[in-house]
Amino acid sequence: MSPAPVTIEADVVVIGGGIAGISTALHLERAGIDALLVESSELARGASGRNAGYLMRGAAENYDACARRFGAERARKLWELTEANVRALREEGAERLESFREAPSCLVAFEEQEADEIQRSAELLDRHGFDVEVVREGTDALWSWGRAIVGLVNPHDGACNPAELLSMLAHKLDRAPLTGEPALAIERGSDGVVVRTPSYALRAPRAVICTNALAPALAPELAGLIEPNRAQMLAIESGGATLQRSYYANRGGEYFRQPDERTIVVGGWRRFFAEEERTTSQQVSSGVQSGIEGFVRDVLGIDEPRVMARWAGTMAFTPDHLPIAGPIDGSPERVWFCGGFSGQGMSMAFEVSRRMVSRMLGNAPDASDPGFELERFEGVAAID
């Protein structure tokens, strides 16, 4: 006979130990709320610890494209939020991490249509008061190879090892996270919730789900709105090649940066295997990995890239590629969700979770918030 689960009490149970979960728990604690963070394995083992580590303003998609899709005002708010996110992480201590690099990000175009979008993006960013730089040449490996047409530089961005950043944030928590305990179910009642794990019954007035791609298993309200997408990367020996910036190419389809003198990390190629990459698996696949190697040869001119490591992480996408942050059930709003960052968690999650916690405490939504509530999808077709 299995022993009865041990009951643990908290004000809020936060489920998921990635960037959104750790940030949410930290903001709750700083507001005087007893938050218990629970993680199925170890902190930062999912996509949050397996990405390229860009601390980046904006999104992989350029500003012109976002303004046309969401409207200029909403795009401006989104860019302002991501600038606030980068500033906040620097203030938390990101700049003091051993892996931190002052590496402006650069959206680079290899074909004329995107080059025109980047030029329009720069002009629009300038009109909206953002610092921006347009480059058409350079001395690093990308520009020396001659494929790039134009780049849009975000001058105040940085980069770091994401797992190191999450470890730093987690060490600021007063209450130790509960690791190795997957959340199996959330039982909702009139007086609160019980989060069931293999060993515990976690009781609290509220729960916040930050499990990203796996969230629909705990919350049926998210079915069809959260889609898993695997991102794959590799690290190669630089062979003397250098990169001065952290690059995004092909509308964010590929990305590459240099964390140290001997290493270049490269990711992407997912769009060529879209169906296969809609998976929660964190194993690499030969097709995508071969594609990334070909991209390295084609764009950086490294004929025989020597691969040092390969890895993958599962992201969560929403229909509009913007996160969901807020209550997902009706009154009295027992269950909240913060996730679906669509590959932009490092650029958004710390600030988005701060604003969500403020709403949870009864404050009005921030006037500068681009709008991440679940209600925006009413009447919108779910992800196929």
Image (spheres, rainbow, N blue to C red):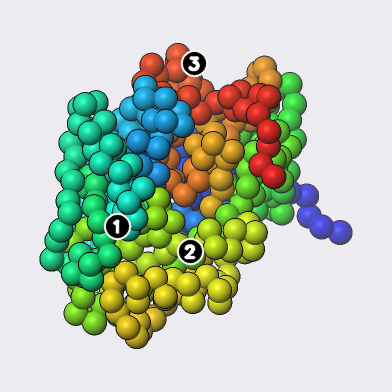
Q: Residue at x 58, y 63 (%)?
A: 273
Question: What residue does disc 1 label?
Answer: 247
121 relative to 368, above or below: below
The x and y percentages for residue 346 are 39, 47
Q: Which is nearer the N-term, disc 1 or disc 2?
A: 1
Q: Are marks 1 and 3 in contact (CB under 8 Å)?
A: no
Q: Secondary structure at mark 1?
A: strand
Q: Residue 307's image quarter?
A: bottom left
Q: Amino acid at mark 1?
A: Tyr
Question: What residue does disc 3 label?
Answer: 362
Regarding residue 36, the answer to whether it shows in the image is no
Q: Which is nearer the N-term, disc 2 or disc 3?
A: 2
The x and y percentages for residue 342 are 50, 46
On screen, residue 268 versus residue 15, left or right, reads left
The x and y percentages for residue 336 are 59, 31
On screen, residue 122 versus residue 305, left or right, reads left
Alpha-carbon span between mark 2 and mark 3:
43 Å
Alpha-carbon span between mark 1 and mark 2:
15 Å
Q: Residue at x 32, y 83 (%)?
A: 303
Question: What residue does disc 2 label?
Answer: 269
Q: Residue at x 56, y 45 (%)?
A: 317
Q: Nearer the viewer, residue 259 or 64?
A: 64
Badge 3: how crowded within 10 Å, few (<14), some, or many (20+)? few
Alpha-carbon span between mark 1 and mark 3:
40 Å
Q: Secondary structure at mark 3?
A: loop
Regarding residue 118, the answer to whether it shows in the image is yes
Q: Amino acid at mark 2?
A: Trp
